[in-house]
Amino acid sequence: MKNRLACAALIAAVFSTTSASAEGWEVTKLVPGSAFHGVHGLAIDKAGHLFAGSVAGAMLYEVDISGGTAKVAIPAPIGMADDIAFAPDGTMAWTGFLAGDLYARKGDGPIKKLASGLPGINSLAFRKDGRLYATTVFLGDTLYEIDVEGVKPPRQIMEKMGGLNGFEFGPDDKLYGPLWFKGQVAKVDVDKAELTVVADGFKVPAAVNFDSRGNLFVVDTALGQLVRVDPRSGAKAVVAQLKPSLDNLAIDDKDRIYVSNMADNGIQEVDPATGQAKQIIIGKLALPGGIGVTSDNGKDTIHVADVFAYRTVDGATGEVTEKARMHADGVTLEYPMSATAKGNDVILSSWFTGTVQVIDGKTGATRDMLHGFKAPHDTIVLADGSILVAELGTKSLVKVSGEHGKDRTALIGGLDGPVGLVGGPDGEVYVTEAFAGQVSRVDRNGEKTVIASDLKMPEGLARGSDGKLIVAEVGAKRLIEIAPESGKITEIAGGLPIGLIGAPGGLPTHIPTGVAIGATGVIYVTSDIENAIYKVVKK
């Protein structure tokens, strides 16, 4: 426990870093932060402590249920936890979804890697005899037995089940879990490798758990429902109507049910007898990345790629409005990580799903969903109506046109980490090359000129009415201004809480820090560490 508290104190100290503005600038927090970076797996130990996992944040948290707070129990990067489970002897195990690793730790002892090389490792559960089982989902579809000593390789039991997600062993020693892609709940005899459907008719079931009486509870992420299922007959009853984007649940020894919601960045306690839900912890934003701003009569609206939702923020009041959330029934959204906005066009992109989504800013309707990109980041709409995409995976700026973006040509290649993108007055564009530590101008003919170098991970990029570029220099945790003609760099604000640590192994789990400028010159910047938005104003 002492080690865990020490880690928590260290992380808290880092997270509480206050920003310092250069002379002439004032930095204020427009939208307050929140505890998690998307919240997924939940588990409760024998002492009644609630633990929660985050994939994007790559951290595992302990939640103070009565106080409504959370502290880091296992820091990044090995704290990445899509699911968490406790063994009969108290050992805690968790899955590093993107890294493909499975870890375990008993008490405050050393962390042991039990398995690796399993991208998409998602759900896990211990049997009463202490044996451990896990599945890959989304990046695989396989059930394994995991050696709890971490010596033997994982033993494959079954595959192609249909997305066997958050599961648990029942009183009959069968493994019960949802089939995400089939809308079913099934039970698996892990000894015989036999699967039987228990209940059907779900939209997107995400996780199951048993209470002390043998009742089986299921969360449906698309419908936002907590459903009780009779494991013998398959009869279903909706216990509570919550919001969509549910991910997991845990039930304590008093049969209190705790449910995680990715888009809310929160956890609720549900009374199964009444269906009443009490919010334990929640955030205004989940994990803000890239942003764009539209201005109407001097009023700024910030469009936020919030990973688990698309939201807008009032630039004056900080009021947050939700436009769409992940996995909600009938909603088109794919883990947005970058956003740009101009006129009536809002464009979201996601490196995780390789998509670029064009949204009508007034109606909120999706006009087009373009697939098949390799780690797309920022985008801009060019004068001819085509879209220019900073494609990190191919080190290119890709010009996209035609029906559903079928025509794609590289304006320029060989860019070292293209992340931020903004247009210039004469058809040129400016791009941050995060890995090279530079900002470059690319003319319409594809010719590149470096205008600033020796920077530390420049990401978010915006252009003011005076032509100067505003850049989030993430590695230096500061906001800078660059004069494009001379390359002169001026610090605007330092000590910003930006630059969340990602997963190990060079995986592109980093969420880009967003920068945007309103009509009156107000600068907005996202904090991926705090899940907050800051406002920077000239005094």
Image: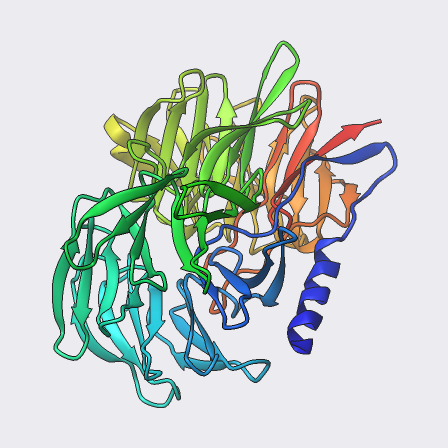
Whether residue 229 is situated above or below residue 85 in the rendered picture: above
x then y, percent, for residue 106: 51, 82
Residue 317 image-quadrant placement: top right
Q: How is the image coloured?
A: rainbow
Residue 182, x across and y down, in percent: 17, 50
- Residue 58 vertical position relative to residue 169 in the rendered view, above or below: above
Classify residue 201 as left or right of residue 269: left
In the image, residue 479 lies at what x, y percent?
Answer: 71, 42
Q: Is residue 422 left or right of residue 174?
A: right
Residue occupying the point 25% across, 75% down: 144
Instruction: State the residue at coordinates (68%, 62%).
Output: 11
Q: Which residue lies furthest to the right in this view?
A: 23
Q: Which of 506 and 100 is in front in this view?
A: 100
Placement of the C terminus among the 4 image quadrants: top right
Residue at 53% over, 57% down: 57
Residue at 48% across, 79% down: 90
Image quarter where the N terminus lies is: bottom right
In-image side of 99 versus 174 (left or right): right
